[in-house]
Amino acid sequence: MVLEVIMDLYQPKIMQNIIDVGIANSDFNYVIRSGILMVVVSIIGLIGGVLCIKYSTTAAINASTDLRKDLYEKIQGFSGGNIDKFSSGKLITILTTDVSNVQMAIMMMLRTMVRSPLLFIGSIVMVFINSYQLSPVLLGVIPALVIALIIIGKKASMLFRKVQESLDKVNTTMQENLSGVRVVKAFVREEYEINKFGKVNEDLTKVNTAAVQSISILLPVIMLVVNLGIVVALWLGAINVNKGTIQVGQIIAFLNYLLQLLMALTMIAMIFIHIARSVPSVERIMNVLDTELEIMDSENAKKMDNFNGDVEFKDVSFSYNDDGEMVLKHISFKANRGEKIGIIGSTGSGKSTLVKLIPRLYDVDEGKILIDGMDIRDLTISSLRSAIGMATQKPLLFSGTIESNIKYGKEDAALKEMRRAAESACAMEFLSTFEQGFQYELTQMATNLSGGQKQRLAITRALVRKPKILILDDSTSALDARSEGIIQEALDKEFNDTTTFIIALKISSIIDAE
């Protein structure tokens, strides 16, 4: 990088000597030698520039890769409460667009943060050494350019922050629409969704246009100021040539240094542009990285390998927001090992909330939850959740094979274990119809399975780990009475020592519960 700058600063001096020494004295051998020297200097500068670009690009890509990894790991540690504070669209924007903005800023800074100031200062020094008579031009050019950079950069940073916020809304709208595309079509709401997306997209276009326009004026301003400087330099140069205090080659060298000054300021301007874009992105990234995890292992958390399965709620109260209404108020009960607890109630009564507290997806506000007589906050999160199997009404299955989805419950599950769990969940009935069996590929969101098939696979995933505590959150709502009966019978037979919590809207689903 330094070598490249030195070569750039040396070239105008060579050009000055060609004019004032070679051409002025008709010494064409000197012109040829100096021309060859200029080519060699240019090639050396080119090599230095290519190497600089290579290493700065590699460093920027590695930095963005590590940053994206840190963000993803941080998000994986989020509790339900942490996740509720960020929309999925915003998190996607942060992981993609914001990280890319930071990557570009890092690359530009590594490439030009050293080169540009060196070239800028070096050009000024060479001007004073070679043609100090023209140096007053710089006293007008430099302050004008610095003021323009500060004013425009400050305004652009504010606008690019709004761009990222608008992009969040676009991503959220697209994600919601794609996730619910079948509902949209079922209710013939395509036109409504198009208009809805059009509005947020138009808002993004407006604020993006304003941001780009605020930046686009920067380069023309730089060109205007520098061109005015060139005109003044030629005027002063002509006066000094007539006086005999300066030579033509010195004027040419000055103009070249002025252009290098322009190049340095242009690169600095580009840094300002990328900084203006990246500052809001950095703030948003740090907002995620600095988020305090609501649920973590306590300092003296114990790892439990063998649970009995006794669960006790002691005066538990909970709300989703610190200043919100309590969803659960002073709940107390005890479930002994092997008992089946049925939970039934109206929509919004807190049934699902209650069972989410057991694996610490959320933490209680008051009271405590005990497993085998120990406060779950005194256990390591991994050992606690490893003892719990959970299946929800709307199961999330990942793209990939059925086997990979079942092994989410137990990574080293053997085929025999998966088959047995699938039989207990009444899933073998449809799995046996697939030619690929457990290797059957699921599409994104498992759209190639029915609702009942998804629920049975989710139950299989929960059962394969042979949990000490099983949570079925309305997880048989899409099943017929026969399939539900088979699952109930399997639970009674195969998992009679498992403490089971069953949430249901139908009394028939919990008729056998204690």
Image (tube, grey):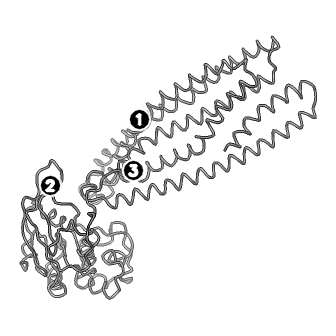
**Residue 319 badge:** 2
- Which secondary structure lies at badge 2? loop
Can residue 453 be seen in this snapshot? no
User: Mark 1 — residue?
Assistant: 159
What is the x, y in percent for residue 334?
A: 8, 73
**Residue type marked 3:** Thr
- Using the rendered view, name the quadrant where residue 316 is placed: bottom left
At 58% from the left and 54% from the top, the residue drawn is: 58
Which comes sooner in the sequence, label 3 or label 2? Answer: 3
Q: Quadrant of the C terminus?
A: bottom left
**Residue 209 badge:** none
At 27% from the left and 59% from the top, the residue drawn is: 79
**Residue type marked 2:** Ser
Please tell me how crowded label 1 is: few (under 14), some (14-19), or many (20+) other residues with Cα within 10 Å: many
Q: Are marks 1 and 2 in contact (CB under 8 Å)?
A: no
Q: Quadrant of the N terminus?
A: top right
Which comes sooner in the sequence, label 3 or label 1? Answer: 3
